[in-house]
Amino acid sequence: MVSIFTKIIRKEIPSYKIHENEDFYAFLDIYPNVIGHTLVIPKKEVDKLFDLEDELYVGLMLYAKKIATAIEQVVDCKRVGMSVVGLDVPHAHVHLIPINEVADISFQSRLKPTEEEFKQTAKLIASAFNKL
């Protein structure tokens, strides 16, 4: 079965895309813990992160590192944390979450940004990414 992330990659469902390349896609989480909460996914549909082929897994981590660097440049935070949960969507993915305190990465409270806030955040992170 095709995951919602595959539908996003195929542009069947809209997203607030930050960047994509041949193998990976980064976009804002629509139910963010904090502003700048980003999902990074491989384009290859694999259910579990640790089932990715080694080369794709390493590539995902390196891509996520670059996305995290861009997030840190434009979102006020002490650091960008990474979380792997994997229960909500059967498609390997990592959450990159700007954090100032542990609660920011807890998934207990989710924000409801406006469309303009989403667009502006995606644009700022994408711009920072493109300068790296």
Image (tube, helix red, strand yellow):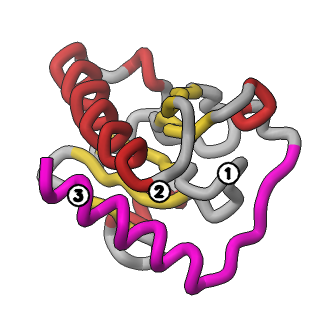
Secondary element at tag 2:
helix
Residue 74 on the magenta span: no
Going by the numbered disc 3, the residue's amino acid type is Glu
The residue that mark 1 highlights is 34
Q: Which residues are magenta?
A: 109-132
For disc 2, the marked residue is: 5
Q: Picture quarter containing residue 72?
A: top left
Give the dominant element type of the magenta stretch: helix, strand or loop: helix
Which residue shows up at 23% across the image and 27% down it? 62
Q: Residue furthest right?
A: 108
Q: In the rendered view, does 24 fall on the left or right side of 39?
A: left
- Residue 100 in view: yes
Q: Position of residue 58 (x, y in %)?
A: 23, 19
Which of the two discs, 3 and 2, labels the residue nearer the N terminus? Answer: 2
Label 2 neighbourhood size at 10 Å, few (<14), some (14-19), many (20+)?
A: many
* Label 3 Cα crowd, 10 Å radius (few <14 / some 14-19 / many 20+): some
Vertical comparison of 97 with 10: above or below: above
Compared with 124, 57 (above or below) is above
Callout in the foreground (2, 1)? 1
Classify residue 106 by image quadrant.
top right
Mark identifier at residue 56 = none
Residue 23 versus residue 13 in the image, above or below: above
